[in-house]
Image (spheres, rainbow, N blue to C red):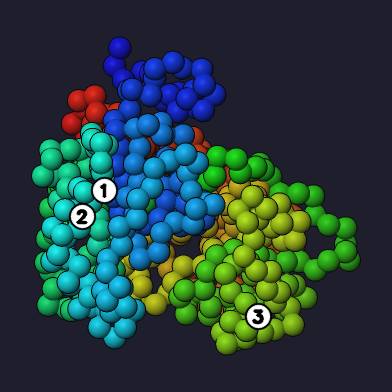
Amino acid sequence: MPHTEIHTAILPALRQGTLQGMSSQFPKLLYFGDVPVESSYHGSALLYRLLEDYPRDRLMLLECAPAPSVPGRRLPDATYEHLPAGPLVTRLRHSRLHRWAGMYLIYTQGRLVRRATSQLGSFKPDAVLTVAHDYAWLAAAHFARQRGLHLHLIVHDDWPSATPVLPAIRPMLHRRFGQIYGQAASRLCVSPTMESEYMRRYGVPGAVLYPSRASDLISFDSPPPPPPPGKRPFCVGYAGSLVSPSYVKTLRLLAGALEEIGGRLHLYGPFSTEDATLMGLNRANVAIRGLIPSKAIVHMLREECDALVVPMSFDPEELEPMRLNFPSKLTDCSATGLPILVVGPPATSAVQWADEHPGVALTVTRNVPELILEAVKTLASDPELRMKLGRTAAEVGARQFSAAAAQHKFQDALLGAHNGSTHVN
């Protein structure tokens, strides 16, 4: 029987212990990369969720980042090895010479391959999994090519443009990335725009692997009933980091708009009140709620907020990554059942996602006070609209961002290559 007819239920069945000997259908998989595999956030969380039910006797994880994954957050009973660069290179990467350190790591991947080989012991992989982040993924590709192994490549960021190197080296990064992208047995891109752009650049198809929710995350299909009049003011929540000055500007404008209608803005993320003060977010109607564990964030957002905001950067220098990348915060936001407000340029991935799924979010495509105020007034005054937006976001999110959807796409990639398919699209 072709593998496409049987494998979609393999991982859930392994979790339940109902299939005997089924683990042998999976390739012996070596994860080799800089992204730690742990239950935390961003790429680390995605890898953890993809590998959560992978047969442990067929899995080895080789982490190359300066800091290893936190033991308490690791995959239970999985084999982890840590293979960081030397202390001098690590220090240089956090100095003014970081571009030179990056170039050194690019040109010395053969050393890392030799060190990795010595760590494998008796483990003989059939396939290699890596993420195009930092530099160890180059060694992972070299390792797979040397041994004739299938390479499975996950791409969250446009590595050739995001990697800090001297400008003269940038064209070489594009060539190197294109070569490895073409080498891979499966190419898992974080957004449809990224997949189509790479098809245009490199002439080979990929597959879209959206960020996913945790397998045990409780999701809701609609907003909760609105609070009784006068119990609390209308509240918009933001859950994420403040890495872009453009995000901060959007949140400042949003706080001002909410202040005009007597509303509040709640911020959830890895920043303090002092950080918010430095960013100009120290307003009376802004509450810093801190970094909330993923298992609790959905319930807290539903209890405290009436809508959620997902900002995308308006900085011209950040437009290309905003176009190709996909905001992982949409996975948990859509699980709340709350309406979503997306603020970003028309070409950015979150706005494109909203355009492709009418009714999934309210969008503002110019970062100006008048339009943000209009959106806030619309959401605050129309409970029926909030209900429709929340339900649509929940339905689309359940279909696209569930742990099962991501694992099935990942299974397609692994088993398609392992059982003889040329590529999974």
Seen at 13% across and 58% down, the residue is 110
The image quarter containing residue 306 is bottom right
Seen at 44% across and 72% down, the residue is 313
| The one of 61 and 345 positioned closer to us in this rendering | 61
Amino acid carrying mark 3 in the image: Thr
Residue 297 percent across, percent down from the top left: 65, 55
The reply to whether the C-beta atoms of the residues labelled 2 and 3 are less than 8 Å apart is no
- Pointer 2: what residue? 115
Categorize mark 3 by other alpha carbons within 10 Å: few (<14), some (14-19), many (20+).
some
The reply to whether the C-beta atoms of the residues labelled 1 and 2 are less than 8 Å apart is yes
- Pointer 3: what residue? 273
Q: Secondary structure at mark 2?
A: helix
- Pointer 1: what residue? 119
Residue 27 percent across, percent down from the top left: 29, 30
Categorize mark 1 by other alpha carbons within 10 Å: few (<14), some (14-19), many (20+).
few
* Quadrant (top left, top right, bottom left, bottom right) of the C terminus: top left
Count of numbered circles in the view: 3
Residue 350 percent across, percent down from the top left: 46, 58
Seen at 53% across and 80% down, the residue is 249
* Disc nearer the start of the sequence (2/3): 2
- Residue 407 showing in the rendered view: yes
Q: Secondary structure at mark 1?
A: helix
* Quadrant (top left, top right, bottom left, bottom right) of the N terminus: top left
- Residue 258 showing in the rendered view: no
Categorize mark 2 by other alpha carbons within 10 Å: few (<14), some (14-19), many (20+).
few
* Disc nearer the start of the sequence (3/1): 1
Residue 22 percent across, percent down from the top left: 39, 19
Amino acid carrying mark 2 in the image: Arg
Please state which of the two labelled residues, at mark 3 or mark 1, is closer to the viewer: 1
Q: CA distance from mark 1 to mark 2?
A: 7 Å
Q: CA distance from mark 2 to mark 3?
A: 44 Å
Q: Secondary structure at mark 3?
A: helix
